[in-house]
Amino acid sequence: METRLLEYFVTVAVERNVTAAAARLFAAQSTVSAGLASLERDLGVRLLERSTKSVRLTPAGEALLPLARTLLADVDALRGAASESGTGVRGLVRIGTFAGLRVIDLPEILGRLRRSHPLVDVRVTVSATGSRGLFVDLDRDRLDLALTALPPASGAVSRPLASYPYVAVLPETHPLARGDGPISLAELADDDWIDVLPGFGNRVQLDGELERRGVTRHVVAEVGELAAVPKYVAAGLGVAVIPDVVPKAGCRVRPVADDLPPWTVSLTVGPSAVSRRHVRAVVEAIHASG
């Protein structure tokens, strides 16, 4: 069995589309389709159900996908170990992170890593769709690792880095700004709210807590960076409940009375990247910094 055919299968399964998979593989669509048919004949099972617009896994495909990923990862690790035997760890590590946040000192960590592993390159990108978008990119092997703030997706390996409590952030002119005690979510229900975009971990978590308490709200402004939320609050557009991780100049900050779980940031490694030695080197450097 050719590993190339397994790569076709895994890529099509992730993309759910043969055309998109072929583009990612830099192969002709007909080549990918023929390779999939060859793999199915070799295995004696149908792996994919195809339509004119999309592809879905059969029960056999669902069962074999994680095994195929493991085999490809093992082959990749074997090739990596062979190429590194005389030169040391090498390769490109693709890292996803949050916009406008500095949960860890990534430049400092990567600077130290460069001195110890000069053949490891990095590409750091920012997600415009929060933790959910980062999980999609990890699952589709567009990223090797990422900072995330939601429970990990299937197959990903996640380890917490830091946790932050939620706080209420109010304009200085707000009637509740004069006190110092905790404020409940229900007390802010009638206010206009500022929040990050849907898909960001703190937004997903807060929406769930509000729903559990039967609290509805009106979000008047959604922004693409958590660090920008207090600026909109300070300008008087509304109130916010956010993790206590960003500056809040020009705002009044009060504790939240509700028992909210903290906002936890984790380092998550994608299912396809777990066994890559150069990725492990970056993961170990990040965890060692804590």
Image: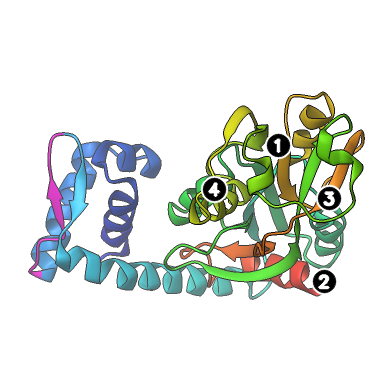
The CA span between labels 4 and 1 is 17 Å
User: To which residue does mark 2 refer?
Assistant: 290
The CA span between labels 4 and 2 is 30 Å
Q: Quadrant of the C terminus?
A: bottom right
User: To which residue does mark 1 refer?
Assistant: 225
What's under tag 4, amino acid-wise? Asp
SS of the residue at dot 1? loop
Q: Around disc 3, counting alpha carbons within 10 Å, would you say few (fewer than 14), some (14 to 19), or many (20 or more)?
A: many
Which numbered mark, 1 or 2, is in the foreground of this view?
1
Residue 61 as seen in the image, left or right of residue 78: left
SS of the residue at dot 2? loop
Seen in the picture, residue 90 relative to 235 is either above or below; the reply is below
Instruction: First in sequence, mark 3 or 2: give its number.
Output: 3
Query: Which circle marks residue 274 in the picture?
Result: none
Q: Around disc 2, counting alpha carbons within 10 Å, would you say few (fewer than 14), some (14 to 19), or many (20 or more)?
A: few
Query: Which circle marks residue 207 in the picture?
Result: 4
SS of the residue at dot 4? helix
The CA span between labels 3 and 2 is 28 Å
Marks 3 and 2 in Cβ contact (< 8 Å): no
Seen in the picture, residue 96 relative to 284 is either above or below; the reply is above
Residue nearest the viewer, comparing 75 with 143 = 143
- The quarter of the picture where residue 53 lies is top left
What's under tag 1, amino acid-wise? Glu
What's under tag 2, amino acid-wise? Gly
Q: Quadrant of the N terminus?
A: bottom left
Residue for point 28% across, 53% down: 13
The CA span between labels 3 and 1 is 21 Å
Instruction: First in sequence, mark 1 or 2: give its number.
Output: 1
User: To which residue does mark 3 refer?
Assistant: 254
Residue for point 90% across, 51% down: 180
